[in-house]
Image (cartoon, rainbow, N blue to C red):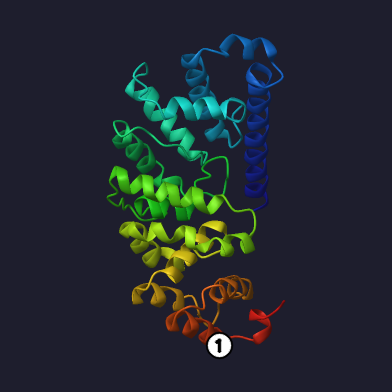
Amino acid sequence: MKIFGLNFRSKKNSFEDESKAMREEQQKLYGSHNIDFRLKIKDDKKAIIKYFIETEEVAKKYHFQGAIHPVYTKELKKIAESEMSDYSKDESFKTFYHLIRLNTLFKPSQKKYPLYQKAYKELIPDIGSLNYYECSVNKFEAYLFFELQKGKNTFGKTNYQEFIQIRKFIFKTHSYQSYPAFRENKEKFRPMLDCLILIKRIQNGLSSFITNSRLCAGAITLLLLDENQDSKITLKSLHTKDQDEEIIDFIAQFYKAHQNSKANIDLLNDLYQKYPKEWIDWA
């Protein structure tokens, strides 16, 4: 066991040393401080894509942030949202793959949407990775888009217009800096109830992904606005015996902002019956 432990530490240190060397080399060649390189590729979109793909192929393998992405995120998104007619299918695919992997939200053209789906599907084995630099895709976002879950080889059908609506919802949840502001603007989420596939996926997936995140806040808001009984059943399924105090506090504040229907009043009352009052009325 002692020898095994030494070998394990040796391999770990070797990987960390290699990773550090690769990262430092990228920063030296392509980092923001390298003015000559930045001037060289400033208006060269093909070069930006070339170096982005090359650096991320290495960065994913060695678990670090590639040197191109942080500096050229805006340019990369703009290229990825174009038809990419000047790029090969492989270049387009790898651009999509690595941008998605780095949780960079962009809107592919309708023509390129099948390739975008293919790139997203390629990430199934890595979704939920413990290493942020290997894959930083938000697990709940992946589920809302395509019903992706780690360990399950499923890929839900989402047409382009549905994808755009789900993306709009995700962006909307990111637009509020505080939860009080979120709750005050709850009616702005109402038009999104028309995206039936989004509502169905929230109903089916929320209990698996519940956290006190803005994305979950948006999901809870939609279910509270929705009059369908299935949405209320989904919310009540969060009221488990072993649910965290933090989550109960989180959902309670949204329930209080939606006391305009008997179903929503019943949800709040159910919390009072199951959990300590101080979890719900701490303020």
Q: Residue at x 58, y 44 (%)?
A: 132
Q: How many marks?
A: 1
Looking at the rendered structure, the secondary structure element under dot 1 is: helix
Question: Residue 112 at x, y = what percent?
Answer: 32, 31
Report which quarter residue 231 is drawn in.
bottom left
| Quadrant location, the C terminus | bottom right
Question: Residue 92 at x, y = what percent?
Answer: 38, 26
Reply above or below: 150 against 274. Answer: above
> Which of these two is toward me, 84 or 186?
186
Question: Residue 68 at x, y = what percent?
Answer: 58, 25
User: How crowded is the residue under tag 1: few (<14 C-alpha within 10 Å), some, or many (20+)?
Assistant: few
> Which of these two is toward me, 1 or 100?
100
Q: Residue at x 56, y 12 (%)?
A: 41
In the image, is 21 to the left or to the right of 248? right
In the image, is 186 to the left or to the right of 198? right
Task: Determine which residue is flagged by label 1.
Answer: 274
Q: Is residue 128 visible?
A: no
Question: Residue 111 at x, y = what percent?
Answer: 29, 31
Report which quarter residue 66 is drawn in.
top right
Please state which amino acid type lies under the numbered disc 1.
Answer: Lys
> Which of these two is toward me, 20 or 105?
105
Q: Residue at x 39, y 26 (%)?
A: 82
Q: Residue at x 51, y 49 (%)?
A: 129
Reply above or below: 181 against 109. Answer: below
